Image (cartoon, rainbow, N blue to C red):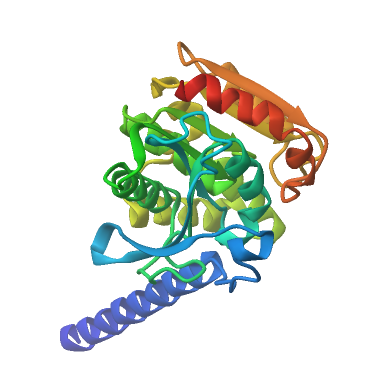
Amino acid sequence: MIAQALAVFATGVAALATARALLHKAIRAGLAAPRVPHHATPASVGLAFETVRVPTANGKRLHGWLIPAAGAAGPDAGGAQPAVIVLHGWGGNAALMLPLARPLHAAGFATLFIDARCHGASDADSFASLPRFAEDAEHAFAWLQARPGIDGARIALLGHSVGAGAVLLAAARRPQVAAVVSVAAFAHPAAMMRRWLAAKRIPERPLGRYILAYVQTTIGHRFDDIAPLATIARIGCPVLLVHGADDAVVPLAEARAIFAARGDTAAELLVLAGDHESFAELERHVDALVRFLRAAVG
């Protein structure tokens, strides 16, 4: 009898472990970012560029496009140029950020457009996450600092959506960052995850809470620590928060909440017409972005 009971118990434990492993696999598959190929290059908008491979964490490499500044139009023609690292959002790639390339180029900034790991043409990794986006931004920053012709003391970070949260986190950890432009950042990963759960009709109790806990364990960070609500106040450089008034993915209220949590950080909030993905309105107001960057980097 005891042997039979132990066998039944062992079978139950094995079945539970199998079910748990299948659940974890399903969670990762459901949250995995789609890898979207580039539909354009800087040449598509008439700019010369260099394709680069930037080393990042876990021995991986990032695909990037380095666009030199327009020497005649640049504020420091003939010397080291200020630069902007541009990071896309979840499921995006560098090509989707190209509407910003010509305005930044004409304003005299060198630009480095990168694909995060598991995105675009960059290396794959075990998973993508906001902290890994931030790691990629930090490694790109260090790589660009060492690049000849770039003023390492005047490099700004610009990110969209998850990339926006990532550049805020990177700047909170890298005091050398000269400025940050955050476009359509969400205030807290848990709130974003709950919206995803609701869209998938997954009940928060008990499955939703389990998923949130599993994600935090997997990425190795508490949501409260990496949330823009927390990182904004730990940044020593100027920050520009840009958000669309018609954003249905991340409500404008979240940008206002981040701005309210800025503490002593020198932050500005720019509200534009437009949704979460559109850069058309940002292009029309690029003068404000350029003025911010020029004031911030000197």
- In x, y percent, where is residue 40? 64, 68
Residue at the extreme left of the image, as rendered: 3
- In x, y percent, where is residue 262? 51, 18
Q: Which quadrant of the figure contains the N terminus?
A: bottom left
Identify which residue, 212 or 282, lies in the foreground. 282
Locate residue 5 relative to residue 141 in the image: left or right: left
The structure residue drawn at horizontal position 33% and vertical position 79%, both measured from the top left corner, is 12
Q: Relative to 17, does residue 141 appear above or below in the rendering?
A: above
Locate residue 68 relative to residue 15 in the image: left or right: right
Whether residue 186 is visible, yes or no, is no
The structure residue drawn at horizontal position 53% and vertical position 64%, both measured from the top left corner, is 31
Identify which residue, 119 or 4, lies in the foreground. 119
- In x, y percent, where is residue 226? 41, 38
- In x, y percent, where is residue 291? 62, 24
Locate residue 280 relative to residue 242 in the image: left or right: right
Identify which residue, 142 or 70, lies in the foreground. 70
Numbered marks: total:
0
